[in-house]
Image (cartoon, grey):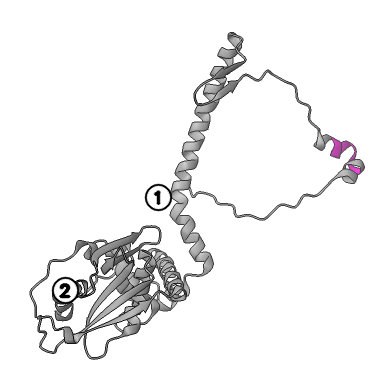
Amino acid sequence: MFGLEKQDLNVTQNRNLYVGGSDVPTILGINKYKSQFELAKEKLGIIEREFHGNEYTAYGNQLEPQIRDYINAVNQMNFIVNTFIDEEKSIRSNVDGIDLDHKILLEIKTHGKKPDIKVYRAQMQLYMAQTGCQVGWLAMYNRPENFDTEFDVERLQIIEVERDEEEIKQILDAIETFWVRCEYLRDQHDMSETEFMTKGTDVDKTLMKLNRVAPDIVAFKKQLKEMEAIEADLKKELYDKMTEYDIKQLDTPLMKVTRVLPTVSKGFDKKGLQIKYPDIYEEFETETKKSGYVKITEKKGKE
């Protein structure tokens, strides 16, 4: 068992706020050790995340910089560790390496006898989606049984993985659905796993997007209403002053102000016509088609 490694705060902090590359296999249902339902409970703090590392992850932490340095030296690359965050989609990618000049991704895996390439590919597709890379290098290092930390080039194999737009779309859709399900679970902790997995329809996704921007919309509308009231008061005050001094127009660096004189407008009493001459009203009545829409009403007292 290795000693404790210094933890990368980009990796360990705020796990509940983001989906990371290591979460992707679980969300896609290809992680045989954890279900999507369990992951959601961890993200929401309903259950504690139990895994805090073991001899395998500690070994990987020891070998990863050695592998990256070797690949950089031999291939004249400049792979550096980096973090990419998409706040809107709540996704964080902590990449083992990226060469920003060549736009190539590096993913390093120290593995046992039966590595799961499908799991690694899924992680890399998410990383390529966030970094904009078109290709990635999967550095597979066959871990020795005695956990020897001295780098052995004979144990290293590099596989080139190309960006797959179809797989990326599948992953991003699955992540979006996962977060929708989390919102339902947040409000109903006793939800069963079966019920949890039924959530995440297209309607659910749209509602979640609306809920995300709703506070900003409400705040903007409130501010707009306040500003319109201020504008009305200032326009009334300005109209009175311009009338007093008989000023027709004013120019400022930002606007042109014109005093519009009072007028009399004529209207049509449709209601009166309908009551007094219903036949004539019906003869000239027209129909106008209006598109359907969604009415959204803010709930009062909602925190």
Q: Which residue is mark 2?
A: 61
The quadrant of the rendering that contains the N terminus is bottom left
Query: Closer to the camera: disc 2 or disc 1?
Result: 2
- Helix, strand or loop at label 2? It is helix
Look at 40% across and 61% down and name the residue there.
89
The question of residue 88 being in magenta is answered with no
What percent of the width, then of the height, locates residue 154?
A: 17, 87
- Helix, strand or loop at label 1? It is loop
Look at 32% across and 84% down and name the residue there.
117
Circle 2 Cα neighbour tier, 10 Å, few/some/many (<14 / 14–19 / ≥20): some
The question of residue 276 being in magenta is answered with yes
- Dominant SS type (magenta): helix
Q: How many angstroms separate mark 2 from mark 1 (CA)? A: 43 Å
What percent of the width, then of the height, locates residue 27?
A: 37, 75
On the image, which quarter does residue 36 sit in?
Answer: bottom left
- Residue flagged by tag 2: what amino acid is it? Asn
Query: Which of disc 1 and disc 2 is earlier in sequence?
Result: 2
Confirm whether residue 114 shows in the render.
yes
Confirm whether residue 37 shows in the render.
no
Q: Which mark is residue 278?
A: none
The stretch in magenta equals 273-279
What percent of the width, then of the height, locates residue 76?
A: 23, 70
Is 215 displayed left or right of 53 in the figure?
right
